[in-house]
Image: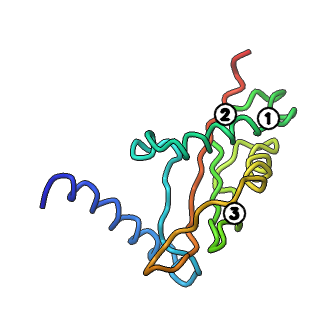
C-alpha cells in the first residue's frame, strides 16, 4: 500500500467507526462527513472557496454577539438532500448570542448543491460546517 492510500484509509475507517458508534447508522444519509470547510483537499476547489466566501458575505453577526465580544467556533451540521437542497440543520457547537441560528439562516438561503452519488443514484450526504468568530478586536 502506498503512503497516500494509507493516509486516506485511516480517516475513512475512523469516520465509519464514529458513525456506527454514535448510533446514527439507522439514518437515511450516506456516512460522509466534512470535518472542516477549510480542509486542505478542498483548498483548491473553486466551488468550495466560493461557497465559503458567500457564507462570510451573507453572515450578519448578531448585535448581542458584537456587544458580548464573543470568541470561538460555531459548528453547524446539515444534509445535502437527493435533490440538492440543504436540510436537517443542527447546531453542534455555538458561542451563543444567536451566532448558530444566524449561520443556519444563511445556509437556508444557499443554492442547491450537486447531491452525493452512490451506485449511480443521488443520496443524502451529511456535512459539518465550522465557522470561527472573533469579535474581541475593534
**Disc with the residue nearer the chain's start (3 vs 1):** 1
Q: Residue at x 72, y 32 (%)?
A: 70
**Disc with the residue nearer the chain's start (3 vs 2):** 3
Which quadrant is home to the N terminus? bottom left
Instruction: Tell which residue pokes out farthest to the right in this image.
Output: 63
Q: Where residue 109 sits: x, y (%)? A: 78, 53
Quadrant assignment, res 61: top right
Disc 2 crowd, CA 10 A, few/some/many (<14, 14-19, 20+): some
Q: CA distance from mark 2 to mark 1?
A: 9 Å
- Dot 3 corresponds to which residue? 86
Q: Residue at x 59, y 81 (%)?
A: 28
Residue 108 lies left or right of residue 2; in this view the side is right
Q: Any mark on residue 133, and which?
A: 2
Q: CA distance from mark 3 to mark 1?
A: 21 Å
Which quadrant is home to the C terminus? top right
Instruction: Tell which residue pokes out farthest to the top in this image.
Output: 138
Element marked by disc 2: strand
Element marked by disc 3: strand
Q: Where residue 134 sits: x, y (%)? A: 67, 28
The nearer-to-camera label among 3 and 2 is 3
- Dot 1 corresponds to which residue? 61
**Disc with the residue nearer the chain's start (2 vs 1):** 1
Q: Residue at x 33, y 67 (%)?
A: 13
Q: How many marks?
A: 3
Q: Where residue 127 sits: x, y (%)? A: 56, 60
- Do residues under tags 2 and 1 come within 8 Å of each other at their CB atoms? yes
Amino acid at each position: 500500500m502506498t503512503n497516500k492510500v494509507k493516509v486516506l484509509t485511516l480517516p475513512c475507517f475512523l469516520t465509519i467507526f464514529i458513525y456506527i458508534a454514535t448510533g446514527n447508522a439507522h439514518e437515511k444519509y450516506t456516512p460522509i462527513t466534512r470535518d472542516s470547510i477549510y480542509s486542505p483537499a478542498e483548498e483548491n476547489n473553486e466551488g468550495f472557496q466560493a461557497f465559503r466566501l458567500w457564507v462570510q458575505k451573507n453572515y450578519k453577526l448578531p448585535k448581542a454577539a458584537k456587544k458580548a465580544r464573543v470568541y470561538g467556533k460555531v459548528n453547524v451540521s446539515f444534509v445535502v438532500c437527493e435533490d440538492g437542497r440543504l436540510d436537517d440543520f443542527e447546531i453542534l457547537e455555538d458561542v451563543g448570542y444567536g451566532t448558530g441560528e444566524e449561520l443556519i439562516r444563511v445556509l437556508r438561503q444557499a443554492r442547491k448543491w450537486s447531491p452525493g452519488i452512490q451506485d449511480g443514484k443521488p443520496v443524502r450526504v451529511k456535512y459539518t460546517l465550522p465557522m470561527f468568530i472573533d469579535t474581541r478586536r475593534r
